[in-house]
Structures are given as C-alpha cells and as structure tokens.
Image (spheres, rainbow, N blue to C red):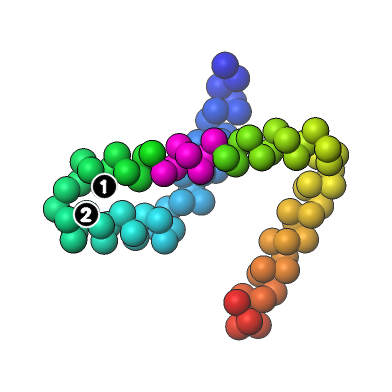
Amino acid sequence: MDWKILIATFTSIFLAELGDKTQIAAIIMTSKTSKPLTVFIGSMVAFAVITILGVTFGVALTKFVPINYIKYLSAIAFIAIGILILTGKL
C-alpha cells in the first residue's frame, strides 16, 4: 500500500466534501428519521458505490486517453464551471 497516495486521496476527498450537499443531506436525513446509524450505513454504501464507479471509470479512461489530456480537460472544465458560476449562469 502506498501511504502517500492513501493520505493524499483521503485529504482531497475529505476537504472537498466538507459542507457539501451530501453532508447536508445526511444531516437532514438524520434529523427527520432519528436513525443516525441507518443514515450512516446508507451514506457509506452510497459513497462506496460511487467511489467504485469513479475508480473503475478512471482506470478505463486512462487506458484510452493520455493522462495529460485528462488533466487539461479537467482544468478547462473547472475554469468553465467557475466562469459560469461567477456570471450567474450556473
């Protein structure tokens, strides 16, 4: 196991998810149902499934598209989304 990659991935995902709509949804579900363990298990299963899909897609994508192209496309997409948010179109 590469601990540097594990820690970098954990840190990136943890910081990206802080205050995210997913966290707010979990808070709302817990307050409505008063079943924190059930909401926790449901949330963890959902995160596991979506992460498996993301990793699987990432592995498949890098077999066909060079990583530099993926980096450039990602950067362009984030910039475009930022511009749309700043202009109020998203």
Residue position for label 2: 30
The residue type indicated by label 1 comes to Val
Instruction: Locate residue 89, reporting x and y percent.
Output: 63, 82
Q: Secondary structure at mark 2?
A: helix
**Quarter-of-image position of residue 28:** bottom left
Residue for point 69% across, 61% down: 78
Res 15 seen here: yes
Given the current orientation, which residue lies at the most extreme bottom position?
A: 88
The quarter of the displayed image where residue 63 is located: top right
The tag on residue 39 is: 1
- Look at the image and give the residue range highlighted in magenta: 46-52
**Tag 2: amino acid:** Thr
Crowd tier of the residue under label 1, counting other residues whose Cα lies within 10 Å: few below 14, some 14–19, many 20 or above? some
Q: Kindly tell me whether residue 11 is visible in this rendering.
A: no
Q: Main secondary structure of the magenta part?
A: helix
Front one among 90 and 12: 90
In front: 21, or 41? 41
Residues at circles 1 and 2 in contact by the CB criterion of under 8 Å: yes
Residue 57 lies, with reference to residue 18, above or below; the image says above
Quadrant where the image shows the N terminus:
top right
Within the image, what quadrant is residue 46 found in?
A: top left
Count of numbered badges drawn on the protein: 2
Q: CA distance from mark 1 to mark 2?
A: 6 Å
